[in-house]
Amino acid sequence: MSADRIVHRHLGGLRATLDGLAGESGRIERWGVDLATRLSRGSRLLAAGNGGSAAEAQHLTAELVGRYRGEREPLSAIALHADTSAITALGNDYGYDEVFARQVRAHGRPGDVLMLLSTSGRSPNLVAAAEAGRSLGLTVWALTGPGPNPLADAASEALCLPGETPSVQEAHLVTVHLLCEMVDRSLASRVSASARATQELVP
């Protein structure tokens, strides 16, 4: 197969997946507003994934603790797979299926959000984390590939995208950026509303 054909086939698959993502704009906006509300009130985001999905989850937490576009206060977001000492200790002592669930039980509090990313939606350690999160009163969101799948079933809510693994993983990065865009927009509107209210109180 020629390089030109490989490129066009890959991009065609990505376009189809992104078309599926375009239909989820309402959910992404709702998640962003909800997340902004929770984080601004002291709750936190916990995130996890395996392999490339771990990189996407860590990208999300980095954008929130740092900044996406404009300057704002840092937001509490923790990538559970980023602590290699915890991951290796938990994997050694409890098995790899428990590496995220045990951290959720340690760090998660009611009102927190747990974001789990998986292109297959079938990773046992993420399903276990989702079950642990829901049992503790966390809101569990899943970003997966085609549904139905076990992770989508275990989550409070799931955004399932069509397509092959590479396309889904690339679209997950777009989803991360869109979610950050919605969080920032929601926070900015709150600041503007607060400033207007303050000005109205000034004689």
Image (cartoon, grey):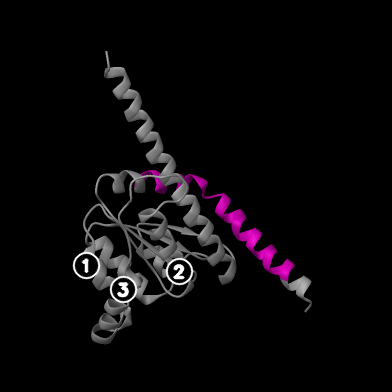
Q: Amino acid at mark 2?
A: Ala
User: Helix, strand or loop at disc 1?
Assistant: helix
Viewer-proximal residue among 106 and 139: 106
Which residue bears the numbered disc 2?
Answer: 55
Residue 11 magenta-drawn?
yes
In which quadrant of the rendered view does residue 89 lie?
bottom left
Q: Main secondary structure of the magenta part?
A: helix
Gap between marks 2 and 1, in whole Å?
Answer: 22 Å
Q: Which mark is residue 105?
A: 1
Q: Which mark is residue 83?
A: 3
Gap between marks 2 and 3, in whole Å?
Answer: 13 Å
Name the residue rendered at 77%, 71% in the picture: 5
Name the residue rendered at 62%, 54% in the picture: 19
Q: Position of residue 95 (x, y in %)?
A: 29, 84
Name the residue rendered at 35%, 55% in the picture: 65
Query: Which quadrant of the rendered structure holds the C terminus?
Result: top left
Q: Amino acid at mark 1?
A: Arg
Give whichever of discs 2 and 1 has the lower sequence position: 2
Location of residue 163 with respect to 85 vertically, above or below: above
Nearer to us: label 2 or label 1? 2
